[in-house]
Amino acid sequence: MYQVIARTWRPQRFAEVIGQSHVTQTLQNAIRMNRIGHGYIFSGQRGVGKTTLARLLAKSLNCKLGPAPEPCGECDSCQEVAAGRSVDVLEIDAASNRGIDAVRELRENARYAPARDRYKVFIIDEAHQITPEGFNALLKTLEEPPPHVVFILATTEAHQFPATILSRCQHFSFRAVSFPEIYAHLEKVCAAENVAADPQALSALTAAGEGSMRDALSRLEQAITAFGSRLEGDSVRRLLGSAPSRMIEQVFEAALSQDRRKILEIVDHLVAEGYQLPHFCGQLVRTARNLLVARVSGSNPNLLEAPPEEIERWTALAEQFSEERLMRMLGILLELHEELRVSMEPRFQMELGLLKLVDAERLVAIEEVLGRMGQAAPSSAETSGLSVRESSTSKSSPTSFRASSSASSLRSPAASRPSPFEQDLARKRQAPTQTEPTPADQRDEGSRDEADTPPEAVSRGVSSRVVSGDLPSREVAWVHEVLRRLEEGSKPVLASLLADHERWEFGESEVRIRLSDSGIVRVLPDADRKFLDGLVSDVLDRKVRVQFAEDWKGPSSPPAAPSASSSEGRDVSRSAAKISELPLDGRVRSDPEVAEFESLFGKRVTDIRPRKD
């Protein structure tokens, strides 16, 4: 009867075992030195040779020429073990014989001497599935078995073994077979089976094995059954559900050129052709890893999991990326691969993850941003210079120097395009530049300061920093938080009324909001006033009272300071007198705020009535 390739090419000698030299050498030395243990644990992933080495050890112990480091393979004992019909080599499946009764039966069999051979060997496969009671029943026999008994426990999950079992056995950990080793063995098998396979096909079969020689041989069997004696890369990849290597390259080329549309087209093609998106993401992860290795260490075939032809292409592509970007891309793909396993919408998750690859270069590491912020702090010399400037020009903005130096430090000359985070940080820290005032400006400004400062603000101790641009950012944040809570509290009208933060004055126990005398404040319900008092107190974290006052910019402002010229004062007095002589309609329409209101809304005020006190 036909036997599959994985069984036909099972190693029959220690020298034929691939990738487990640390185990084979130790076992052969133990046989040479006659230091054969009574219990062994073989652990490792599937298809790496655990059961095969257990049979080889049994053959070496019971060989007619043995115990021998290499079994002859020709005596009756060797042939019976290879065929699985030896009465002294018992293979037990722990998945179906895991209880205490099965272990008791095993103990009874161990008491009897071998029927013909030198040793009675018990090979227990998937031994981690034995129940705790079964392990406890095996302890004594495993610790002090009869001299003719050898136990070999094979498992893929050694961490589930009790410590009492591990301490009674010699533990051998099998490693995954490397990519070059599987690739070379597949080439050998194809040559012996008269199968012509190109490097791309062998690379796809090797990658599908994922470190398991048996899995790779099973995939080779499947490909030969599907395509006969000639295997091509594209057809084999399609059979295995893997995307063509060219499509993998297109993803990284689109990320390099920041072509978002190409990314979406690739995902659409994958879905239309029926590819499994998690499997495709796994291919991207391996490719990103190969690109990173090629960028760091060059075209080293021992580190790259690819055939020589693909290594050249990956090395050329890796030169176009920086190491930092490749590491960031690999991290993004690893997160995407993990998320696709549980995602309810794998297509959307794949599109989002691949679009992140496009913007990976624009991201800035948090360490770099913090380093730049640390460099943005002014030195002692700059600080002393700043204090001198503040003392000499009291009207200059004290934050303009710090903001400009911070913004300049954030813009690195080597960065061709600042990241969105840098742009936002620079915009927030950039203060409006103020020019040095001229003597005339200083004279006019002094008069305006005295005229614009309400007397009651001085008497009550209310802060006068209310002009545009001088309100501290902390107080602006308070105003914005109050407005946000008003909108969330279903009071959008009140929020819109108080939206101008330039009209807020903050004192120790009082917050004054200056509004023009439009009559809206007079009809404000008491409930809204109390609600506003509590809300502002909550935001400021202290008890305050909100007061409404008239706008200091109106015509009722105090007269100009004596420092202004007398001619200018007389002109202002004449203008005020002329305005006062006008009728009510003329006085209202001559008000600059009314003119600004009409210009803003594009409508003319039609109904003007005197106020009823």
Image (cartoon, grey):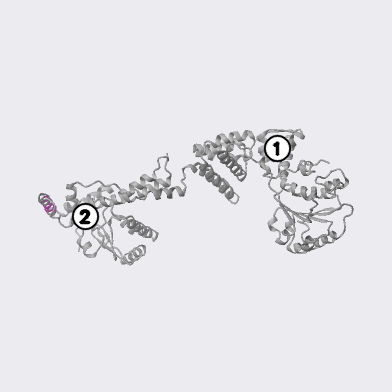
In depth, the one of 445 and 79 nearer the eye is 79
Rendered location of residue 130, percent (x, y): 75, 59
Amino acid at circle 1: Ala
Among all residues in the image, which is located at the extreme front?
33
Measure the C-alpha gap from mark 2 to mark 1.
Answer: 88 Å
* Residue depicted at x 40% and y 42%: 412
Residue 481 appears in the figure: yes
Rendered location of residue 18, percent (x, y): 73, 43
In depth, the one of 91 and 558 nearer the eye is 91
The quadrant in which the N terminus is found is top right
Q: In this view, does 382 lie to the left or right of 327?
A: left
Residue 348 appears in the figure: no
Rendered location of residue 249, percent (x, y): 57, 36
According to the picture, the residue beneath numbered tag 1 turns out to be: 184
According to the picture, the residue beneath numbered tag 2 turns out to be: 553
Can you tell which of label 2 and label 1 is closer to the viewer?
A: 1
Residue 563, which numbered label? none
In depth, the one of 203 and 536 nearer the eye is 203
Q: For the residue labelled by badge 1, is the local secondary structure a helix, a strand or a loop?
A: helix
Q: Main secondary structure of the magenta part?
A: helix
Q: What stretch is highlighted in magenta?
A: 571-579
Amino acid at circle 2: Lys
